[in-house]
Amino acid sequence: MDIKNNEMEKLYAETFHRVEEGAILTGKVLAKKQDSIIVDIGYKSEGVISADEFSAKEFNSINVGDPIEVYIEQIRDSEGMVKLSKDHASKIMTWDIIEKAEHDGTPLEGRIIEKTKGGMTVDIGGVRAFLPGSQIDTKIIKDTDSLIGETTIFKILKINNKRSNVIVSRRAVIEEERVKLKGVTIEKISEGTLLEGVVKNITDYGVFIDLGGLDGLLHISDISWGRINHPSEFFVVGDTIEVLILKYDKTNERVTLGYKQKQPDPWLQVYEKYPAGQKVKGEVVSITDYGAFIELEEGLEGLVHISEMDWQQKPKHPSKYLAIGETIEAVIIKVDKEERKISLSIKQTKPSPWELIRQHYTIGQQITGKVKSLTDFGAFIGLPEGVDGLIHISDMSWTKHVKHPSEFLKKGQKVEAVIITLDPENEKMSLGLKQLEPDPWTEIIPSKFKLGDEVEGKVLRVTDFGIFLELEGSVEGLVYSTEIIHPETESPEINEGDTIWARIIRIDLEERKIGLSMKNLKRTEN
């Protein structure tokens, strides 16, 4: 019995030696109360941990018999119990781990919990560490809020002597990982190899691809065989894409990438696939002031110039005919493999209006159209087929001298006319207004007017070479300047609108002219 008592005293002595304020040891859960947990630490008195040190989930998961790391805060409290702390034990052990990680260069896991001035705060096992903004990533992170709550790996950069401040780096871990990845990637790289990469950055001139610790440049000219305005039309940052290694400069570690080269160049067989005159279908992918680009297949586009949109002489803006995304039919006009250009025509998918004119109209036929425009020399008449015919000023009247077409016609007026000439090859058509009626110079005028007749006329115009008279409202005659006699009145001048008498002294049927004289009139003026 004395031997046993001695052993027990020795055991208690060892236990008491270990149980001292500030020590950390492993205890065993004896009981759970509503506000605390009772722990056996191998001492003559049990220890107690306040329930406040646990989250609800943690507290509910603890079972009697579970081991638990504790920190001895006070050997005897007011109730004779040993006051313990789980949090304090955890933080002290975490500090030990952090100091060892700093010494060994071992990365630790932590969770970003908030933004702070100059960086962010990271929780490493209950210890708050500072993550400077420059150490967040290898690239600038615009939206750092998105990182809050993220659990990742950090490297310990510095710990002050009082264990009150820890500085960590996420960037250092990323850089080390990239160095490892880079070694693996370099082993894979060779010209002509296909590799997967992630779109890292997009610029006006190309796309930078992260191949795994090593960046490569995909130039804008190597993205598509077709037309491209900006790389962002094809890629978004974060996309995983497959690229071809075009060139690898080992010395400078520069990688040139290709994307379009994964597919054959569609221009190689362009002459065989798209001969001139062939009808094709394609999608409208771009509209400009001078025309529209049509995608015939991936990487192959053709241009419909504005002049090939419509048979009209003055076509409208291309956007009036086409819309982006629309599928249209066109005819191939010209293919230039060297210049990588295909010229297309939409209007040639339909008959030329002049071809319709050739088929449906003949000389002498009477037509109906609208006056589209007036010029000094005539009027252009628009026909339903979309072509214009010209009524020359000389073909507006058989008998009157027309100074301007506006004397007979106005813009927008609907008129009837007769086809005088028809030349579809040169896209010309002459029309006549006067030809709607018989030529009065063939029968009516010769029978109605004789040499020597005295006629009354209304003055139309007074010129240096004579006076034009309107005779019986149908034909004009000219009183030659040498044949004018001014009246002996208070107003000897002859003005437009006056009515005077004259004698016919000349009738020229070929020239269609009547010459007049005011001399030697038999008639006595009243």
Image (cartoon, rainbow, N blue to C red):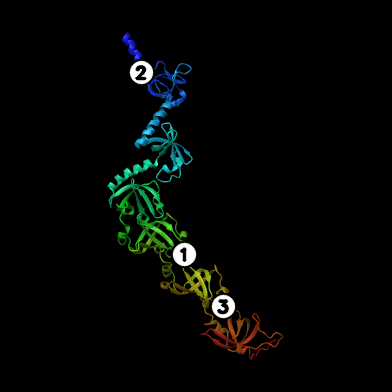
Residue situated in front as seen by the camera: 90 or 4: 4
In the depicted structure, whether residue 36 falls above or below residue 239: above
Q: Earlier in the sequence, mark 3 or mark 2?
A: 2
Name of the residue lying farthest toward the bottom: 520
Q: On the image, numbered disc 1 is attached to which residue? A: 315
Secondary structure state at the residue bearing disc 2: helix
Callout 1: few (<14), some (14-19), or many (20+) C-alpha neighbours within 10 Å? some
Q: On the image, numbered disc 3 is attached to which residue? A: 403
Q: Residue 19 falls in which quadrant of the image?
A: top left
Three-letter code for the amino acid on which mark 3 is drawn: Lys
Residue 112 spot, x, y in % from top left: 43, 37
In the depicted structure, whether residue 21 falls above or below residue 222: above
Three-letter code for the amino acid on which mark 2 is drawn: Glu
Secondary structure state at the residue bearing disc 3: loop
Q: Residue 74 falls in which quadrant of the image?
A: top left
User: How many numbered marks does the figure carry?
Assistant: 3
Image quadrant for the N terminus? Answer: top left
